[in-house]
Amino acid sequence: MRRSRYFLPTLKETPAEAQIVSHRLMLRAGLVRQHAAGIYNWLPMGYRVLDNIKRIVEQEQDRTGAIEILMPTIQSAEFWKESGRYEDYGREMLRITDRHEREMLYGPTNEEAVTDIVRQTVKSYKDLPLNLYHIQWKFRDEVRPRFGVMRGREFLMKDGYSFDLDEEAGRRAYHKMFVSYLKTFQRLGLKAIPMRAETGPIGGNLSHEFLILAETGESQVFCHRSLLEKSIPEDVDYDADLEPVVADWTGVYAATDEMHDAAKEAELGDDLITARGIEVGHIFFFNTKYSAPMKAEVVGPDGATGPLYMGSYGIGVSRLVGAIIEASHDEAGIIWPESVAPFRVGLINLKVGDAATDNAAGDLYRRLQAAGVTVLYDDRDERAGVKFADMDLIGLPWQVIVGPKGVAAGQVEVKNRRTGEREEMPLAGVVARFASSH
């Protein structure tokens, strides 16, 4: 994409309403613009990041055997009354009445909607296990929306729902999602800490939050140092018993600030570290909380009919955009992990109008695109300082700088945005360098 033709409204000054780093940088880097309190327009650069995150989440869900569907944003209140949550959910639920005086709502989550789908279609244990997920916009009418997309009213979420014959099978599904979430966040370039959590209005008796560590995190976290060094293998056998993997991650102490006193008694010494975390995922196992009142039942192998055992699994897709920035930035701007970056390479023409430089930069741009490398080509007639500042602000992983002196010598400069390291390399070798690791 040529910068001169791209819609990328960057800002030099920080808007007064932006209170945290991610909100400031998302506005300054032209990722979003506010539409109303807690509701944002996603501009082209921000939407590319959102789409990259969404793609990784989908890939990792599909690897577990979960099946993607799409449920509506507007739901019937009838199902929420069946489950008993319609009055319990509170004022965060945006209630609507249509022209026929039917009670509707803008969905804050989808337990009831997906349970209705399954009770209509799944009647036998032979149809199990089943895990359905979708990535859809949600709305929760926060009393005080703030911090940009980190705590907005409208947000994009992956919510998945498992259905099993009994509690043992339901817990296996829960363990599968636990491991899948660790792998998902790892692919997004994040270190996620799983933490035992309250179930809240979702319900149930087993729940974990997934927190990523950032200096500006919402809550204080105490955890064992070894959690920061753990990783999930590239290939996970999701048909295996994953409980030992989950136990390995949850057997080491991790807690929020409310459990500070307990953390002091864990006797972990230097291995107990304190950090701040941002919640980016939450999983629940709630047995028959929704299936029993809504009569989502199946016939088991013994011929008896019983309610399904369910779990739900959420990832804040739009929230992750802000969370990644909170965890990965410097004074100059955003530093995107390569897996989610809107473009991999920022190509800078230092002297637009110079025939040799224009030809070299233009040819390099076309060849990078042909090799499948996503590239933003800054071909504007602007000062070099403006271009460098903009590239640092938007945070693309690599910058390729083409100038008259380098072209004359057959060289370009390549800068790594994360480390700041620069190197000279032959102009002829640039495409192979990035295409080989694409």
Image: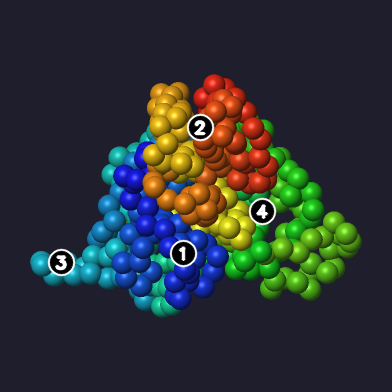
Q: Which residue is mark 2?
A: 63
Near-viewer residue (338 or 236): 338
Residue pictured at 70% horizontal, 71% vertical: 257
What label sits on residue 98 in the rendered view?
A: 3
The Cα–Cα distance between marks 4 and 1, rounded to whole angstroms, is: 35 Å
Near-viewer residue (221 or 108): 221
Mark before the other along the chain sequence, 2 or 1: 1
Mark before the other along the chain sequence, 3 or 1: 1
Position of residue 370 measured from the top left corner of the image (x, y, whole percent)? 41, 24
Residue pictured at 55% horizontal, 28% vertical: 408
Position of residue 222 measured from the top left corner of the image (x, y, whole percent)? 74, 63
Mark before the other along the chain sequence, 4 or 1: 1
The Cα–Cα distance between marks 3 and 1, rounded to whole angstroms, is: 45 Å
Mark before the other along the chain sequence, 2 or 4: 2
Q: Which residue is mark 1?
A: 12
Residue type for callout 1: Lys
The Cα–Cα distance between marks 4 and 3, rounded to whole angstroms, is: 43 Å
Mark before the other along the chain sequence, 2 or 3: 2
What label sits on residue 193 in the rendered view?
A: 4
Residue type for callout 3: Asp
Give the label, 3 or 1, closer to the camera.
1
